[in-house]
Amino acid sequence: MKYTFELKRQVVEDYLAGRGGVLLLAKKYGIPGKSLVHQWIKAYREFGEEGLRASWTKETYDAVFKEKAVRLYLSSGESYEEIAARMHIKNPATLNRWVREYEMQGVEAWIPKKRGRPRKQK
């Protein structure tokens, strides 16, 4: 189920103003479970209102950016969440995937590959 930006903002504002806990607000606004409310609060704290807006475009990151984020994660001892917030990556799971790809294939994992069927030779 998709939730509007206005609803997300209202839930977060209510939480930050002390008008209820996560579970109470989830029940009040008909949100199944409290984990979604936690995600909205975290996104708001890290990115402001932009963190609550639905993104209609897929974020793309180049290989240099990915390598920088992965190396920072591997060298710093910080969590995926901390590095993702610092590098403005909305989803920490994205960084987790990059680390796994890097450990398996190195930077070659992010070099674009030709897609589709090869052309016929005449």
Image: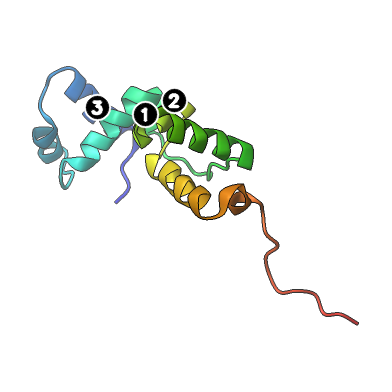
Q: Is residue 102 above or below residue 82?
A: below
- Left or right side of 91 for 70: right
Return the residue found at the far front: 75
Q: Are marks 3 and 1 in contact (CB under 8 Å)?
A: no
Q: Earlier along the polypeptide chain: callout 2 or callout 3?
A: 3
Residue assigned mark 3: 12
Distance from disc 1 to disc 2, alpha carbons, whole Å, reads: 6 Å
Q: Are marks 1 and 2 in contact (CB under 8 Å)?
A: yes
Q: Label 2's element?
A: helix
Residue assigned mark 2: 86
In this rendering, the label closer to the viewer, 3 or 1: 1
Q: Nearer the viewer, residue 57 or 43?
A: 43
Residue at x 24% of width, y 27% of height = 12
Number of numbered discs:
3
Q: Label 3's element?
A: helix
Three-letter residue code for mark 3: Val
